[in-house]
Amino acid sequence: MITAGVCLTLQQAVCLRRETLAYDGLGELKKLIVAAAERFVPGDLEDFRRACDMVRLAQLGAILAASDCAAWSPAGTALIGWNGCGCTPANQAYWDDYQQHGRETGRGMFFVPTLPSIPVCEAAITLHLQGPVCYIRTPPQTRRLQEHLDDLFNDDATIRQIMLAEIYEDHACLLLCDRQPGPLPDHNDLTAVFWQAKKDLTP
Amino acid sequence: MTAALVHIHHAEAISAAGDDLAAARATFAAGAQPFVVPTHFAARGVHHGLCTALQPAPGESRAIALLKRLLARLPALGDDDAVFLATTVGAIDCLEQNASGPTPDCIGILLDAVQRHFPRCPVTLVAAACASGQSATAAAMRALRGGRCRRALVIGIDICSEFVTSGFVSLGAVSRTLTVTRPYDAKRDGLLLGEGAGALLLSLDTDTGTAAGPLGALLAAGESCDAAHITAPNLAGEQLAALITRTLQRAGLRPEQLGGIIGHGTGTIHNDQSELAALDLVFAGQGACPPLLSIKGNTGHTLAATGVLQIVYGLDFLRQGQLPPQAGLLQPAAGAERWVAAKTRPLRCPRLLSLNVGFGGLNSALILEGRA
């Protein structure tokens, strides 16, 4: 079942259980989190400054989702990136930069994010998650994602929870699911799942 | 309790080592390094492991052409089968050729092509950087064990491209020699890129419909993340060692019950150091170590394809009962003497450990057993 989550944009982060945060850009959200460190789970944001927005959304979203969880522990946590916009924007950014440099030299800081698994790996580094981490793409039906969740839980008893991340250029949704029964409701994206869960929690 | 065996019913591989298994066997046996300078992009003298038989039609994506070549060799799938596709960049050459217009979804193009070929099967793309091939295989094993499909087809594929080569050059990961790569060697200085496509048809069922039976079986798979650095591995190898140990336990095996190891072995300073450190931890206190091989000395680093190719070629090594010589090896790196050799070595028993690691600190371990 879903235990915690966050939907965030470049201006606002709505948590499943905690208060909404408003800010002007992800740099300011990072400052908010660092300034009130005691209210958030600790996170390694060393890579934040040079990261693109998709990575930043993953890093900060992971901290917010973990902080939204009543009993957070990084141990036994897997992380799956699902659908979103994958690596397409990062591919174009690297290729444009490479062409602008006369196709002579690429730049590593643009090349590394061209792998679709990089945002979730950066989120794993941020929270020090050592469980399985990968990106998958399926047709946009949460029941397809649910199958992977179930298979992962059934296959490995040491996995206690799975963080799901659907990341776009300007928004992201991250959810935490534990082993308790309660499948993801049938939707096309995690944002719709989040809002249904939020509604169900509202008295 | 160990999980159900996953049987391998069909295996295909296309790489610089060979367009088919027989050709690849000869390449491996000779320790050959068939690297050449590509002509389909400006490679600036950097040698690559190319699928030389591949001839895309004018305007056709090289990735799509390679995929078609692989798909033509695969059996048909049914409604109750599933496909798991591993790729890191997909049809990245579509971006290179795109002068204007919206950015092509390069991994989506490849995914759609697979879906069109198998319209009745769910197709899942699994991306875990250079561990994608084994990660997709692990996902397929879970799906089979979870009863989601009768058979699972795993495809690993990536091509050589200006995009990827320029990126790896920018990271300083490509061998300064530009012509050779020397996994586990004292003088290794980087990787050479390769392209390839591999496929595995898996099932819990032993019945292949033929007298030959399954080609082998997958006993266990495991994945983890170092969670330390986005490009550099943990040089002490602790996370990878812990994963190998867990995977062995899940297979109900002890380290000495492995016959050999196919390492990730990119030929970069840090990858090989990390991997050797991990193996030293797992085999600490053991006398003789199982032989270790990196196929990248023959194929180049084929990114998402490498995990699948390691299994396909691993099946052939198991069939022969030996690991071929390590291509490119002149003098083993300090501490690698007990693991690698430039000569053919017998497998201690018909079981192989196969390792993949990838950017993001991703680790994958998989145990493969030959046919009894």
Image: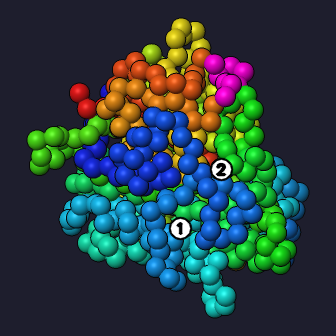
Mark seen at residue B90: 1
Q: Position of residue B116 (x, y in %)?
A: 34, 76
Q: Quadrant of residue B89?
A: bottom right
Q: Position of residue B161 (x, y in %)?
A: 62, 66
Identified at 49% across, 60% down, the residue is B52
Identified at 75% across, 63% down, the residue is B44
**Relative depth, front residue between B198 and B235:** B198
- Amino acid on which disc 2 is placed: Leu
Mark seen at residue B210: none
**Relative depth, front residue between B287 and A188:** B287
* Residue occupying the far bottom of the picture: B101
Q: Secondary structure at mark 2?
A: loop
User: Badge 2 sits on which subunit?
Assistant: B
Specify the quadrant that holds the N terminus of chain A: bottom left
What's the magenta bit mostly, secondary-structure-wise? loop
Q: Which residues are magenta?
A: B330-337
Identified at 71% across, 41% down, the residue is B268
Q: Position of residue A12 (x, y in %)?
A: 74, 75
Residue highlighted by disc 2? B192
User: Badge 1 sits on which subunit?
Assistant: B
Q: Is residue B215 left or right of residue A55?
A: left
Q: Is residue A1 left or right of residue B186?
A: left
Can residue A72 be seen here? no
Is B272 inside the magenta-drawn segment? no
Question: How was this image coloured?
Answer: rainbow
**Relative depth, front residue between A42 and A127:** A127
| Residue B158 against residue B177 in the figure, above or below | below
| Residue B341 against residue B12 in the figure, above or below | above
Circle nearer the N terminus (2, 1) = 1
- Amino acid on which disc 1 is placed: Gly
Q: Quadrant of residue B243?
A: top right
